[in-house]
């Protein structure tokens, strides 16, 4: 199959970058929400330890010894430090792609690919942004697609096997060899071309999934035209 080597339209690149800016903004917001949840857990643990310590001190005759108060303070400090840092903010792994529900697969793939962005060459970043646009377009279609349908299997294979396989094949190559020509092209150029091919394939899949809806809309339009326009006196 011949590869379409036409330049990517500038309008599409601008839209891709605009959408990426929105995704990054939402991702930062989610990270802050995640950090605040950790902080609330840490503060809750400190309060719980303090309340238990005070309660035990009131119950025990003569109160708690100073060394136990010191131990409780140390425990509260350790609990706060651990819970304020762990668990780390979740980052999708390949296993998450394989286990994701079909309706969540596009968004999970987008997050996974964004997490690999810093390891990819500059020429490939436009393709990454375009894939993000195509995944945003595909996401609502996957929510209503039958997971057992042949199209679902094709989407899963592309997003959980071919795309991660391409990216990981590149990142496994030592950085000193990524710009060296091999088999008529450099690894960086092969990756960039492969990502553009995947972007076009996602677009084609989205169009295929929309075809039934487009056909149904055309039929509905002809029906309305026949009923309300072609026969106004009926």
Image (tube, rainbow, N blue to C red):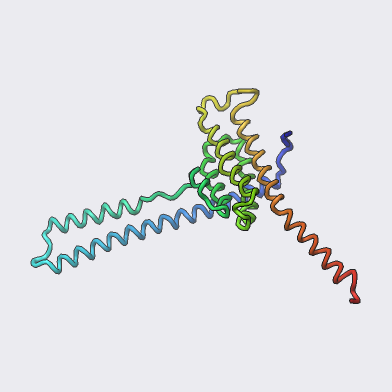
Q: Name above or below for residue 128 compared with residue 102.
A: above
What residue do we see at 65% from left, 23% from top?
Answer: 184
Q: Position of residue 170 (x, y in %)?
A: 55, 32
Q: Position of residue 181 (x, y in %)?
A: 61, 23
Q: Quadrant of residue 190?
A: top right
Q: Is residue 13 left or right of residue 171?
A: right
Question: Residue drawn 15% across and 65% down?
Answer: 57
Name the quadrant containing residue 226.
bottom right
Residue placed at 56% from the left, 36% from the top? 165
Q: Count all numbered tags in the image, as a single digit.
A: 0
Q: Position of residue 33 (x, y in %)?
A: 44, 58
- Residue visible at 73% across and 56% down? 212
The reply, left or right, for residue 223 in relation to residue 98 is: right
Can residue 104 be seen here? The reply is yes
Q: Residue furthest bottom?
A: 233
Residue 182 image offset from top left, x and y in percent: 61, 23
On-image quarter of the C terminus: bottom right
In the depicted structure, whether residue 198 falls above or below residue 63: above
Residue closer to the observer: 172 or 227:
227
Outermost residue toward the left?
62
In the visual, does 29 lie left or right of 63? right
| Front in this rendered view, residue 4 or 210 | 210
* Residue 133 shows in this picture: no
Q: Which quadrant is home to the N terminus?
A: top right
């Amino acid at each position: 199959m011949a590869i379409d080597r036409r330049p990517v339209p500038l309008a599409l690149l601008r839209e891709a970058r605009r959408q990426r800016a929105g995704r990054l903004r939402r991702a930062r917001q989610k990270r802050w929400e995640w950090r605040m949840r950790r902080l609330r857990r840490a503060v809750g643990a400190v309060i719980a330890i303090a309340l238990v310590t005070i309660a035990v001190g009131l119950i025990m005759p003569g109160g708690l010894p100073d060394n136990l108060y010191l131990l409780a303070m140390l425990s509260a400090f350790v609990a706060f430090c651990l819970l304020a840092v762990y668990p780390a903010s979740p980052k999708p792994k390949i296993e998450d792609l394989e286990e994701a529900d079909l309706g969540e697969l596009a968004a999970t793939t987008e997050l996974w690919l964004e997490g690999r962005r810093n390891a990819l060459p500059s020429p490939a970043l436009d393709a990454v942004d375009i894939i993000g646009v195509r995944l945003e377009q595909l996401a609502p279609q996957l929510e209503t697609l039958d997971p057992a349908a042949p199209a679902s299997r094709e989407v899963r294979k592309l997003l959980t096997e071919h795309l991660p396989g391409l990216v990981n094949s590149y990142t496994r190559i030592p950085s000193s060899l990524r710009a060296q020509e091999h088999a008529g092209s450099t690894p960086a150029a092969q990756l960039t071309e492969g990502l553009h091919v995947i972007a076009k394939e996602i677009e084609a899949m989205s169009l295929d999934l929309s075809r039934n809806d487009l056909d149904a809309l055309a039929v509905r339009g002809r029906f309305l035209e026949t009923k309300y326009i072609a026969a106004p006196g009926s």
